[in-house]
């Protein structure tokens, strides 16, 4: 008969287990940050050698110039002041896909000429290029088009990031449209997956992302 | 009346025995996914947002540079560069990059990626100087860390 008494107390009360776990959970929620490894990538040019000429002469029409002064005002191609950063996206899009005088010279690591690049574009893009672009005053073709961004020493980092964001958006739009994706889908391609890597390479072949960050002037404008 | 009363006698409590298990699962999720900060950031960090972000694939190759106004007011208001847990001068960057490169295996040394976390109020001057030094140190891959821009603005 004494046994029945024992039976009642043999279980440990687990009711407060949830509270303890909650406490731990809240501690981890508060103290930790999920690491963000996202950002805008940029490849710097190689180190400048002493005896190398400072500037390799490029045709002016193949360079899309963006200047930012110390008041964060933006000047495009030396003659156009814009207030809204988002205008840059379509300008760069048109500039890169201009195909003013596409050549047959094979350039770059993939050895693709401008004509081959043009032939590989989807029909919708080709008709856009034919009807709206092809000006002799803009770039010869994607392989020679360079976007040059020159920010004054006194300009803010914020505007720099905004412009860099727009430039990347323009290129991603071109790459995406070329393989039938939106710019967002293109950006999310995983290069570790061989099939997605092939798509990524196909989109980029012949159209290098040539963003040059020029040395700024020492005196603010 | 008596019919209804009989029914209500059965217990109405939701069984909470599984609650600790659920909470533990959440707890483990957070414990696994989060990374504890190794370095204390000594400069202000309000990083401008951007849209066209690329995710870094190899975390091992990334080292961080923090640029911004120092949090400690005694250090002045000019932006400073913090590498790992100490401030470096512009001239010290090449040496710092070489030290970081030595930590990687030989084949990966040229692929070192410098992640720059820059406060939005910083002027471009210091950033360009840092870029020039990184070029000199042959660490050419850089990434401007930025959080995702929310879609509504």
Image: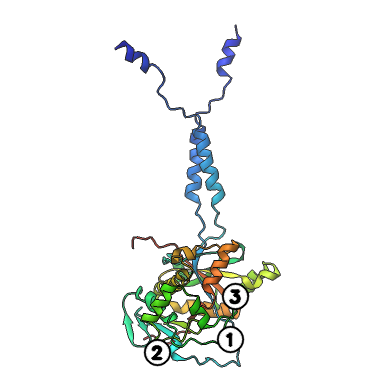
Considering the numbered disc 3 on the image, is that residue within a helix, a strand or a loop?
Answer: loop
| Dots 1 and 2 on the same chain | yes
Considering the numbered disc 1 on the image, is that residue within a helix, a strand or a loop?
Answer: loop
User: Which color scheme did the rendering employ for the protein?
Assistant: rainbow
Q: Toward the viewer: A145 or A152? A: A145
Number of residues whose C-alpha sits closer than 10 Å to that of mark 3, classed few (under 14), some (14–19) or many (20 or more): many
Residue A142: give x, y in percent of width and height: 48, 81
A60 up-or-down from B91: above or below: below
Which residue, given by chain and number where applicable, does mark 3 sit on? Answer: B139
Q: Chain of mark 1?
A: A
| Residue A125 as seen in the image, left or right of residue B104 | left
Quarter occupied by the N terminus of chain B: top left
| Dots 3 and 2 on the same chain | no
- Which numbered disc covers residue A48? 1
- Write the residue at 49% across / 40% down: A23
- Which numbered disc covers residue A103? none
Asked whether the viewer can see residue B63, the reply is: no
Residue A120: give x, y in percent of width and height: 50, 75
Q: State how far apart marks 1 and 2 are (Cα).
A: 30 Å
Residue A191: give x, y in percent of width and height: 57, 64
Residue B133: give x, y in percent of width and height: 56, 79
Q: Quadrant of residue A8?
A: top right
Q: Chain of mark 3?
A: B
- Which numbered disc covers residue A137? 2
Q: Toward the viewer: A189 or B101? A: A189
């Amino acid at each position: 008969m004494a046994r029945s008494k024992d039976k009642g107390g043999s279980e440990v009360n687990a009711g407060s287990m949830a509270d303890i776990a909650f406490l731990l959970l809240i501690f981890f929620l508060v103290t930790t940050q999920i690491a963000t490894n996202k950002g805008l990538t940029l490849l710097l040019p190689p180190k400048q050698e002493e005896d190398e000429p400072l500037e390799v002469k490029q045709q002016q029409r193949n360079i899309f110039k963006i200047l930012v002064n110390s008041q964060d005002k933006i000047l495009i191609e030396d003659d156009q002041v814009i207030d809204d950063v988002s205008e840059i996206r379509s300008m760069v899009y048109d500039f890169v896909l201009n195909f003013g005088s596409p050549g047959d010279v094979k350039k770059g690591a993939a050895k693709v000429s401008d004509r081959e690049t043009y032939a590989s574009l989807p029909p919708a893009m080709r008709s856009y290029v034919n009807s709206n672009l092809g000006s002799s005053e803009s770039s010869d073709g994607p392989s020679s088009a360079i976007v040059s961004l020159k920010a004054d020493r006194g300009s803010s980092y914020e505007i720099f990031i905004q412009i860099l964001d727009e430039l990347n958006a323009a290129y991603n739009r071109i790459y995406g449209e070329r393989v039938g994706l939106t710019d967002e889908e293109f950006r999310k391609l995983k290069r570790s997956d061989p099939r997605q890597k092939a798509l990524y390479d196909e989109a980029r072949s012949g159209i290098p992302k040539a963003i040059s960050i020029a040395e700024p002037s020492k005196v603010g404008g | 009346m008596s019919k209804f009363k009989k029914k209500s006698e059965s217990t109405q409590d939701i069984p909470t025995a599984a609650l600790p298990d659920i909470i533990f699962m959440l707890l483990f999720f957070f414990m696994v996914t989060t990374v504890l900060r190794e370095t204390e950031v000594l400069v202000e960090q309000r990083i401008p947002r951007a849209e066209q972000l690329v995710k870094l694939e190899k975390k091992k190759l990334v080292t961080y540079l923090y640029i911004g106004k120092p949090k400690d007011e005694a250090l002045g208001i000019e932006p400073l560069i913090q590498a790992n847990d100490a401030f470096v001068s512009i001239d010290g960057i090449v040496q710092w990059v070489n030290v970081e490169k030595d930590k990687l295996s030989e084949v990966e040394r040229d692929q070192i990626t410098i992640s720059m976390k820059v406060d939005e109020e910083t002027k471009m001057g210091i950033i360009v100087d840092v870029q020039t030094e990184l070029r000199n140190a042959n660490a050419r891959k850089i990434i401007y860390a930025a959080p995702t821009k929310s879609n509504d603005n």
